[in-house]
Structures are given as C-alpha cells and as structure tokens.
Amino acid sequence: MTQKKSVEVLVGQQRLMLRTSEDPARVQQVADLVNQRLATIQPPTQPLSHQILLLLAMTLAEDLLKK
C-alpha cells in the first residue's frame, strides 16, 4: 500500500490540504490547471460563487469528453 502524504495547494484563492498518494508535483500541476481555467471564467480578485464553480466543472468535463 502506498503511503499517503499531505499536500497543500492554492485553488481559487483557497488553501487546500489534501491527503494523497500522488506525487506532490502532480497534485500542484492539477491545481495549476484548475486555476488557469478559472482565470478564463472570472478575474482572480472576485470571490467565487457556486455558479462559477459549476461553470468551471462543466468546462473541465467538456474538455475530458473531447478527448
């Protein structure tokens, strides 16, 4: 069994502490991708809303379905 470790990332101006067996660099890469997509939807200075998060989820899901 792979040992889980704590990895801290910043997503949408929110600090998240994640427990994962993934490589911390990979987790940061995922967080960076989410932040990049979020920046195309909304300026980083505005607070996040549920509607923005849902729109983000829909655009990321659309990207997955295109592959």
Image (spheres, rainbow, N blue to C red):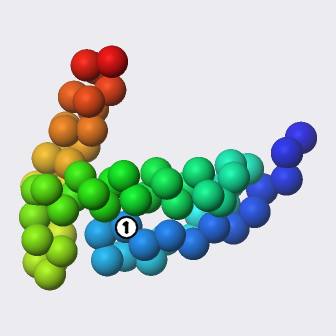
The C terminus sits in image quarter: top left
List the residue tagged with mark 1: 11
Q: How many marks?
A: 1
Q: Alpha-carbon neighbours of circle 1 within 10 Å: few (<14), some, or many (≥20)?
A: some
Answer with left or right where residue 3 lies relative to residue 66.
right
Measuring from the top left, give residue 51's x and y in whole percent. Answer: 10, 55
The answer to whether one can see residue 52 in this image is no
Answer with left or right where residue 61 lies relative to residue 26.
left
Amino acid type at image mark 1: Val
Please say if 23 is above or below 58. below
Tell which residue pokes out farthest to the right in this image.
1
Measuring from the top left, give residue 17's x and y in whole percent. Answer: 57, 71
The N terminus sits in image quarter: top right
Measuring from the top left, give residue 64's x and y in whole percent. Answer: 32, 26
Please say if 19 is above or below 48. above
Answer with left or right where residue 20 lies relative to residue 59.
right
The answer to whether one can see residue 17 in this image is yes
Q: Residue at x 69, y 67 (%)?
A: 6
**Secondary structure of residue under mark 1:** strand
Give the quadrant of residue 48: bottom left
Q: Residue at x 59, y 63 (%)?
A: 18
Measuring from the top left, give residue 54's x and y in whole percent. Answer: 18, 48
Q: Residue at x 10, y 64 (%)?
A: 42
Answer with left or right where residue 4 lies relative to residue 26.
right
